[in-house]
Image (cartoon, rainbow, N blue to C red):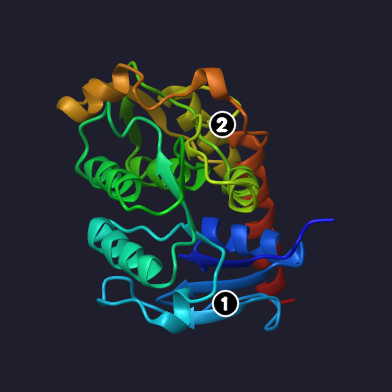
Amino acid sequence: MTVAKRILVTGGTGPLGRAVVDRLAAHGHEVRAVSRHAPTRGEPRAFTWMAVDLLGGEVPESVVGGVDTIVHCASGRRGDVEAARNLIAGARRAGGPHLVYISIVGIDRVPFSYYRAKLEVERLIADSGLPWTVQRATQFHDLMLSACQLLARSPVMPVPAATSFQPIDVRDVADHLVELALAAPAGRVPDIGGPQVLSTRELARSYLRAARRYRLVLPVPFPGPVFAGYRGGGQLAPDHAVGRITFEQFLAERAAATGDRKAQVTPR
């Protein structure tokens, strides 16, 4: 029988954080979800939500006090390092709970500014004195979808040439984070990736089929060190393809959900 734990999830209303919260709550754990924005769905008593801005300075004792584990899913375009410092300081004051962090495959191989911030957060956690676990994952399906939607705005859809990605579903990542949250601290654990390594041309065509759109897909050699890193495969984890949900399955689910919503509002 699993002993119930008190677990704090940062970014608890985002796609990944909410998936982690739902799984932990379903298994009877006492879950605190913190974020800047209130949850839009879910049972009110399944978890406790707290409005917290990790960039706002000291993290209150009422947030981190008494928890066994913190799963740090909160992230943004800016401020990740500062947010991590504030969270780590709060965790130290609270007695040193296990800190589980979700990072990105290739942050030490692709020279992207956002990746450099994630790498710095990893270093802060490793040097924090807290018991810790870091899990790196490949890009999420949601990110690949957003990129495809952006690139498909024109009649010709340019995609990075000679580049592949290995997208993974947030539900698969959430399953792994829950396992890590309930286990002993493990340091840097093996990377995880989606079930398929797909070229940008394949990703684009999968999106266009699901969206029922036509675009000429044109591979273009995007310049710069970031795309050179991508062409070198630094973002991939082919030996750790543990994800189960493919990009096409994800797109089909999104298309079905969008169709259902449209059907609900279509006047008779």
Q: Nearer the viewer, residue 184 or 246?
A: 184
Q: Is residue 209 left or right of residue 140?
A: right
Q: Secondary structure at mark 2?
A: loop
Q: Position of residue 159 (x, y in %)?
A: 33, 29
Question: Which sits earlier in the primary sequence, circle 2 or circle 1?
Answer: 1
Q: Nearer the viewer, residue 256 or 62?
A: 62
Give me the disc on residue 194: 2
Gap between marks 2 and 1 measured at Cα: 28 Å
Circle 2: residue type:
Gly
Question: Which residue is at a point 34% across and 30% down the rendered structure image?
Answer: 106
Q: Is residue 162 left or right of residue 193?
A: left
Q: Is residue 75 left or right of residue 24?
A: left
Q: Position of residue 38 (x, y in %)?
A: 50, 80
Q: Secondary structure at mark 1?
A: loop
* Quadrant holding the C terminus: bottom right
Query: Residue 176 is drawn in which quadrant?
Result: top right
Question: Which residue is at a point 55% across and 37% down the rendered structure image?
Answer: 168
Q: Nearer the viewer, residue 268 or 207?
A: 207
Instruction: Decide if residue 223 is in sight here.
Output: no
Query: Residue 245 is drawn in which quadrant?
Result: top right
Q: Which residue is mark 1?
A: 40
